[in-house]
Amino acid sequence: MEFKATDIAAYLNGEIVGDSNVKVSGISKIEEGEPGTLSFLANPKYESYIYTTRASIVLVNNSFHPRAEIKTTLIKVKDAYQSFASLLDLYVQAKKDSRKGIENPTQIHETAKIGEDVYIGAFTSIGRNATVGNESKIFPQVFLGDNVSVGENCIIYAGVRIYDDCIIGNNCILHSGAVVGSDGFGFAPQEDGTYKKIPQLGNVILEDDVEIGANTAIDCGTFGSTIIRKGAKIDNLVQIAHNCEIGENTVIAGQTGLAGSSKVGKNCRFAGQVGLAGHLTIGNNVQIGAQSGVSKSIKDNEIVLSSPAVNYKDAIKTYTIIRNLPKLREEVIQLQKDVRSLKKADSANSK
């Protein structure tokens, strides 16, 4: 499918500089641009590529002023990055998978309810009283346990496992290998040194517009529910333990782990490899830097990093001191030598 520069500019309310009749049918990075593709320039760090790129169209900010000749067609917009994201959404919608129907073989229990215009891939298993909403797509080798509810317009990619009684809202995306509703890590130590498993009786609830990354595990509640609120985005390889709650529009990057009963507020941002201890409360609009270890609750609007996590300004000061330790050590050694020399000189003068 081709898009003309004039159509793109009209969609983005942008201004064309160059050939308004040029057409594109694909997307590319500005440094790897090829004829027939569209790219964007939002970060000044990549400006040099705009003078050499072979991309047919490049989105730029209204404030951009070239410092040399540019061969490609520019479309000036208020925010090149956001405009590019909007175009990507349009491009994906144009290429949207239109598969419908039920492939064979599948195992769908007779009590399950399947909505209209649904796709169910081969080797999928759907349990008793499970429901799949209209226009959802269940790719091959997915397991939906008993009483699982999948909302409308969801995409459940190949190999996802959703345990009994879990609830998936509308417009959710679960990537391959994700496990929803697995047992929480609950074991009671016994006198003989063994561990007795504590039954996990709860479920997991994903509200609308949630996305779960590949190979992420979300444990069911011991009692009650583990809840991922509306609009939250969870990256690959994340562990969310039993009875956690993730607030609306919070984003969590890969290899992060949340211990049991942690409560995370709205609009938080967790970088990669963050670790949360159990039973903590993280406020709204909190940002946690990469590889931070959080052992205490955090108030609204805080920015923390390091392990143990502290206010980012204090963390930066600490890093600065640590970097200067070798120099400080040398200075201390030199001062010790100077003091010894002075003592010797003073002792000699006193004789």
Image (cartoon, grey):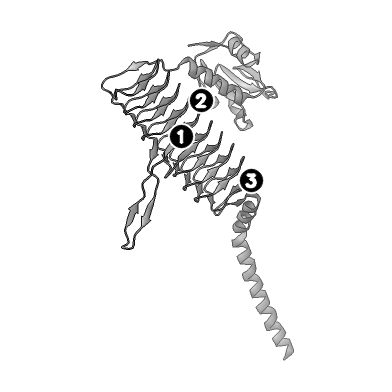
Quarter residue 214 falls in:
top left
Residue 143 higher or lower than 342, as above or below: above
Please report the residue visible at 46 percent of the width from the left and 34 percent of the height from the top. 205
Which badge, 2 or 3, is on the more N-terminal residue?
A: 2
Please report the residue visible at 65 percent of the width from the left and 79 percent of the height from the top. 340
Q: In the image shown, does 180 or 318 lie closer to the viewer?
A: 180
Q: Secondary structure at mark 3?
A: loop
Q: CA distance from mark 1 to mark 2?
A: 42 Å
Which badge, 1 or 2, is on the more N-terminal residue?
A: 2
The circle drawn on residue 104 is none
**Disc 2: which residue:** 32
The circle drawn on residue 205 is 1
Looking at the rendered image, the disc whose residue lies closer to the viewer, 2 or 3, is: 3
Q: CA distance from mark 2 to mark 3?
A: 39 Å
Residue type (three-letter) at the residue carrying disc 2: Glu
**Contact, mark 3 vs mark 1 (Cβ under 8 Å):** no
Residue type (three-letter) at the residue carrying disc 1: Ile
The circle drawn on residue 302 is 3
In the figure, is residue 342 to the left or right of 138? right
Q: In the image shown, does 321 or 174 lie closer to the viewer?
A: 174
Query: Does the image show residue 52?
Result: no
Residue type (three-letter) at the residue carrying disc 3: Glu
